[in-house]
Amino acid sequence: MELRSRVDQALKQAMRDKAASRLATLRLINAAIKDQEIAGRSADGATPVGDAEIMAILAKMTKQRNESVRAYEEGGRLDLAERERDEIRVIEEFLPRQLAEDEIAAAIDKAIADVGASTIRDMGKIMGKLKERHAGQMDFGAVGPQVKARLG
């Protein structure tokens, strides 16, 4: 639960610093985590959300904001696009460092070798291996076509 406590600490610090926009973003993160916990509750009680699930939540939030930035820029609302970028910067503080293109290529090659993939039918195994090893470190929507190109 290290990631959850980091978010809580940052939230408290933002309150002390009276950083309104940062505080609002951190509250959104906290709310998304709590929503996930509520959705995961079963009859036997609450199950806490782990770091991997929190990283998935944060990655989804970042992706949503990137889409909003594009939409706002196309609509000429640069002020709203900049606000979304500020939120992305806050969210990314809690995500692991994104891999560079050459690191992504090396990770794909290693996953292909580890799985013993030779055809496009092995793509699911490769993507599973990449998600297991590099959760939150790459955009899997962009990685999929690269994997296909290597197998095809």
Image (cartoon, helix red, strand yellow):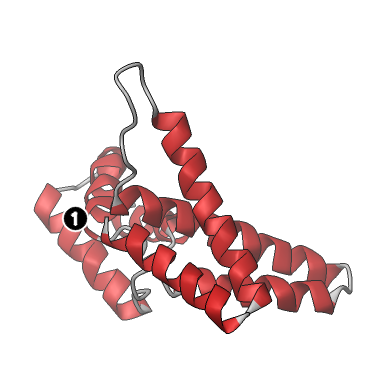
Does residue 6 appear to the left or right of 29 in the view shown?
left
Q: Quadrant of the N terminus?
A: bottom left
Does residue 46 appear to the left or right of 63 in the view shown?
left
The residue sitting at 41% across, 52% down in the picture is 56
The residue sitting at 47% across, 58% down in the picture is 58
Identify whether 96 is placed above or below 51. Answer: below
Identify whether 150 is placed above or below 50. Answer: below
- Depth check, front residue: 106 or 27: 27
Identify whether 76 is placed above or below 129. Answer: below
Residue receiving disc 1: 112
The residue sitting at 64% across, 66% down in the picture is 24
The x and y percentages for residue 110 are 16, 63
- Depth check, front residue: 12 or 131: 12
Q: Residue furthest front?
A: 16
Q: Amino acid at mark 1?
A: Ile
Question: Which quarter of the figure has residue 133?
Answer: bottom left
- Depth check, front residue: 75 or 105: 75
The x and y percentages for residue 148 are 37, 53
Q: Residue furthest top?
A: 43
- Depth check, front residue: 63 or 79: 79
Q: Secondary structure at mark 1?
A: helix
The x and y percentages for residue 11 are 49, 68
